[in-house]
Amino acid sequence: MNRELFILLNLFNLNSTNEMDAALLPINDQLARFRQAIICNKTLMTVLSRAAEMKLPNWYLAAGALTQTVWNVVTDRDPELGIDDYDLIYFDDSDLSWEAEDAVIQAGKKIFADIPTEVEIRNQARVHLWYEKKFGKPCPQHRSSEASMTTWGTNTALIGVRLREDGEWDIFAPWGFSDMFTLTVRPNQLIMTEETYHKKVQRWIKLWPELTIMPWK
């Protein structure tokens, strides 16, 4: 029996445990539950594996696709339901030109050409150059991918995963996992606008009516 299947059978038995109760588990058990939910999404795992091969600096597969996979597992849906993109981020402040970022994006298009869902690649060192024009609120110049993630607009986005060379996972989750398992959505108002928050949650509640949406104010 391979290692992933062994963990899946022993730590993520959906028939014996209410996954919403995972929010009450110790953090190491929450990490195990999170990991096994993610493994259920085969497209995500393919993207994660190929992203590691790109060897981008300070990279993560991040944001909604991870949380939405967990929501789908918790609510017994197709693990890929409702996921409209996979966010692959990295941090390279050695060249802030669009041309340098676009070269990475074009390389990614070849690597992920057969992936049915868009893989969006963005250099977090450049976000401050375009964010205000697109979203209407200024964004600080980030010093790392982790610093960038802490500013993202909802708790659902504050999660990132990457594969190390030894095959283990690095997981960055500044707001933890409890809200993820209890299907709770909260705004992060550092740079998110109220209008953008409402647009996001209106889409999500149609796909996952079990969600608890916390108000902006």
Image (spheres, rainbow, N blue to C red):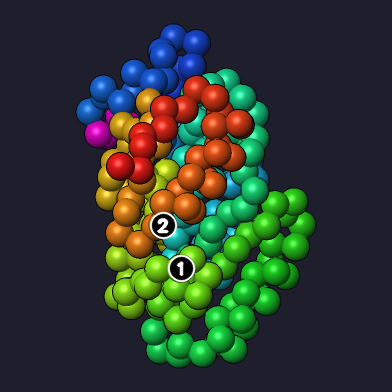
- Left or right: where does residue 84 sit relative to residue 185? right
Q: What x and y, as percent, mark residue 165?
A: 43, 61
Question: In this figure, which residue is indicated by the disc labeled 1?
Answer: 136
- Left or right: where does residue 72 sit relative to residue 195? right
Judge whether 146 appears above or below 160 on screen.
below
Residue furthest left as drawn: 26
Label 2, label 1: how far apart the Cα atoms are? 8 Å
Q: Residue at x 59, y 40 (%)?
A: 203
Residue type, mark 1 in image: Gly
Q: Which mark is residue 101?
A: none
Magenta segment, which residues?
27-31
What is the magenta segment's predominant secondary structure? helix
Query: Are the two marked residues, 2 and 1, in contact with CB atoms closer than 8 angstroms?
Result: yes
Q: What x and y, as percent, mark residue 156?
A: 42, 44
Q: Earlier in the sequence, mark 2 or mark 1?
A: 1
Q: What x and y, as percent, mark residue 1?
A: 53, 28
**Magenta stretch containing residue 142, yes or no?**
no
Q: Label 1's element?
A: loop
Q: Residue at x 40, y 77 (%)?
A: 128
> Residue 21, located in which quarter of the rendered image?
top left
**Magenta stretch containing residue 28, yes or no?**
yes
Q: Label 2's element?
A: loop
Q: Which mark is residue 193?
A: 2
Q: Residue at x 53, y 62 (%)?
A: 88
> Residue 119, located in which quarter of the rendered image?
bottom right
In terms of depth relative to the viewer, which is nearer, 9 or 66?
66
